Image (spheres, rainbow, N blue to C red):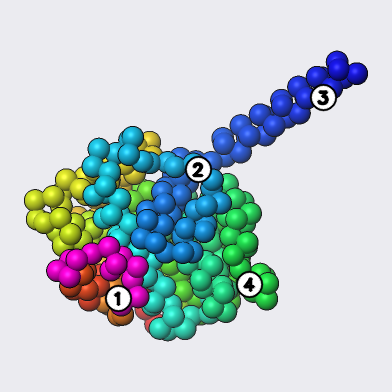
Amino acid sequence: MQKIFMTAALICAVIFLSSAKTLAAEFELVSYSAQVKLQWLATTGMPEAKKILAEFGTANIYGKKNLKDYDRLEKLNGIYQELCYASTAQYVASKNYKSIIDIGGGYTPRAVVMVNDGRKYLGAELNAVAISAMQIMPKFIKPEFQQNLFYDEVLVEDRFAMNEAVGKVGRPVCIIEDGLMIYLTKERADKMFTIIHDVLKQNGGCYITSDFVTEKMFKDLAVAIYGENSAQKLFDETAKMYENLFGEPLHLNTFKSEIEVINFLKAKGLNVRQVPLIEDPSQLYSLKKLNTYQASQLKKICAKNYLWVITAES
Ligand SMILES: C[S@@+](CC[C@H](N)C(=O)[O-])C[C@H]1O[C@@H](n2cnc3c(N)ncnc32)[C@H](O)[C@@H]1O
């Protein structure tokens, strides 16, 4: 009897380990950056981010052990993530877009907030993230809106999958991109924007991002909180962390200037409007972490035209 039990236990262990290995192998390194972004965001105190993060148990990807300047990096990156989050969330709410595709959406709480607000949301992701997000995120969606949340494998260069995604959420579509650009080669970005143009031309809507001003925005924030001298160092350390996670150099300098990006997009038939990052910063959790001077500087950053609204030329 004992022998049968031991054999059964051994078979179970082998099955468990081999399936765990398969899942791990499917997770590309870049996928972990989504969890890191969620970790930073949760440090601001945002309840939705904290609840989603708790689903990952104790798996901390970065921490005091592997980041030298941990305390300053944590504060700065948390606030930076909240600005990225809030700018896209507020823009969607102000225009009342009902159909959202979040490319490289990871585990952002945007999904939960937007769906519970009556919108349709599709996280366009790599396969393993799409599967795990579909296991985690519906737990936070109200029963009546469960059918409005989707996570699918949609690679940015896959025209068919992108069109299918629009078919699920409807039109006009607001395509959100937050944190993906640094992982795309120029060739991939080129293919992606060709498809984005066609999708927007056919369906109406826009593509919103602050990714083309990442460095400027991050350093503005670093200056506001820690002063001029630290900004470059804190940016470099953060970039290094994402690079270590990715296992390859980041694509930070694909475009040499904003004008070059605007011309690149124009050549694809896309228009760019640069609008204030956040119209109403009063609800930011990050404000509670700042002194009066830092808070006033943060509000000035929110008023800068750091959100890019990209549309297809009509
Ligand atoms: C830095 S994370 C961004 C997470 C999310 N946007 C947020 O705000 O929390 C980048 C995400 O892009 C996804 N990704 C990477 N390459 C992709 C591709 N070619 N197509 C779609 N998603 C991709 C990764 O799996 C990862 O979740």
Mark 3 vs mark 2: in front: 2
Of mark 3 and mark 2, the one earlier in the sequence is 3
Q: Which amino acid does label 2 sit on?
A: Thr
Instruction: State whether label 1 is within 8 Å of ligand 1.
Output: no
Which amino acid, by three-letter code, is at mark 3?
A: Ala
Give the spatial CA distance, label 1 vs label 2: 31 Å
**From which residue to which does the magenta span run?**
281-294
Mark 4 touching mark 3, by CB under 8 A?
A: no
Sequence order check, earlier mark of 4 and 3: 3
**Residue tagged 2:** 58
Query: Label 3 neighbourhood size at 10 Å, few (<14), some (14-19), many (20+)?
Result: few
Task: Kindly indicate whether the residue at mark 2 contacts the one at mark 3 (C-beta within 8 angstroms).
Answer: no
Mark 1, residue position? 281
Nearest the viewer among 201 and 108 is 108
Main SS of the magenta part reads helix
- Give the residue at x 15% y 52%: 231
Front position in the image: 302 or 121: 302
Measured in 3D between alpha carbons, the distance from the residue under mark 2 to the one under mark 4, in whole angstroms, is 26 Å
Question: Circle 4 is placed at which residue position?
Answer: 142
